Image (cartoon, helix red, strand yellow):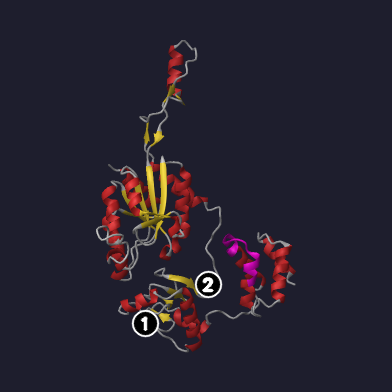
Amino acid sequence: MFEDFLYLLRRNGLKISLTEWMSLMEALDKGLHNSSFTGFYHLCRCLLVKSEADFDRFDRAFLEYFKDVPFQQEVSQELLDWLNRPDVLNDYANWDEEQALKNMGLSEDEIEKMLRERMEEQDSEHNGGKYWVGTHGMSTFGNAGLSPKGIRVGGQSMYKRAFRVAGERKFRDFRRDNTLDTRQFQVALRKLRQFSGLVDLPPTEFDVDNTIQDTAENGGLLKVRYKRPRENTVKVLLLMDSGGSMDYYSQLCSALFQAVSKSGHFKDLRVYYFHNCVYARLYNDPTLMSRNSVTTDWVLSNIATDWKVIFVGDAQMAPYELMGGYYGRSNPDGPQCGLDWLRMFRSRYQNVIWLNPSRRPQWGAYWSDTYDTIAREFPMFPLTVDGLEEGMKKLLAR
């Protein structure tokens, strides 16, 4: 069954074994596709695609082979026609902070369930509300809305708050050969090199110029000269925001991380992670597991003041997370909020910058508040090649 489909997938570069193909046949025989075309699509992708890097390739082949097969869309075309009208509303009078906090408390599973329920109930267009699938409201589904969390349905990405796009069947390009971005970042990071010939090392580096000079002065008899090697004296502390809205920039941040890790430009490098803002603990990997973390006090006490500090994050969160004092309290006499922790870094280290993959929010003061507050504390640069180069110059400034 579908042998031509197997050969098409292989021609498109997907390495599918006969064992995997027979597993698909067995799954179909057991009805694991729920007798639906969409179920068949997900089953094929689950069993035949080994890496996210191949999602795009699989989609193209799947749509080519089944281009004439009608299938039930997750979102009806009628609803999409309602929603794909960006001119319906264009103001922010519908902001409701109480509803925003309520939406933030919903899990992704709860929002998914609510969307399925609304799809069964809704039979007309809605805009500016907080219950139905619509636009420019506080609902957790629709597009161009103000909810800090939800599912985008139709429309174009505006605020990058959605954790999923309903009906979306396109995937980011996760190819492993994205060396261009990484290479560009590496070139920019070279500007952070500070070589010094005064390091306490023996003269082991071949000195070409002086060898030629001494040999000439010695009547042509070879006289080899050595010099002390120059060593990059820069030490970097990299602190990266992980999770939440930063997931949208994961590929860009991955390129930066690879460039920093593989550059070899630094005498020492330490990398820690945080979520939204630095609080009482920093984490050794982006999963932010407590068992794999250190206290921020330890980092501030053990990382010397001559280190260059680079924060990477979108600087966007609920204002109370940064300034409200709810997060980050470790003792009554210590920092009481995220902003206090950031100021401790600013006061301890002379060279600190903030790299931001996101532009300043333009959809209301609530979301731009923390962005502006952090930008006042640290020199902030866009996470682009040009921005990175400017940031490196700033780090080297005396």
Does 302 sit above or below residue 77? above
Mark 1 = which residue? 128
Tell me the residue at 46%/75% (across/down): 151
Q: Amino acid at mark 2?
A: Glu
Residue 53, magenta (yes or no): yes
**Quadrant where the C terminus is found in the figure:** top left
List x then y, in percent, for residue 143.
42, 76
In this picture, residue 42 sits left or right of residue 372: right
* The furthest residue to the top: 219
Mark 2 = which residue? 168
Circle 2 Cα neighbour tier, 10 Å, few/some/many (<14 / 14–19 / ≥20): few
Q: Amino acid at mark 1?
A: Gly
Magenta stretch?
A: 43-56
Circle 1 Cα neighbour tier, 10 Å, few/some/many (<14 / 14–19 / ≥20): many
**Quadrant where the N terminus is found in the figure:** bottom right
Tell me the residue at 27%/61% (across/down): 336
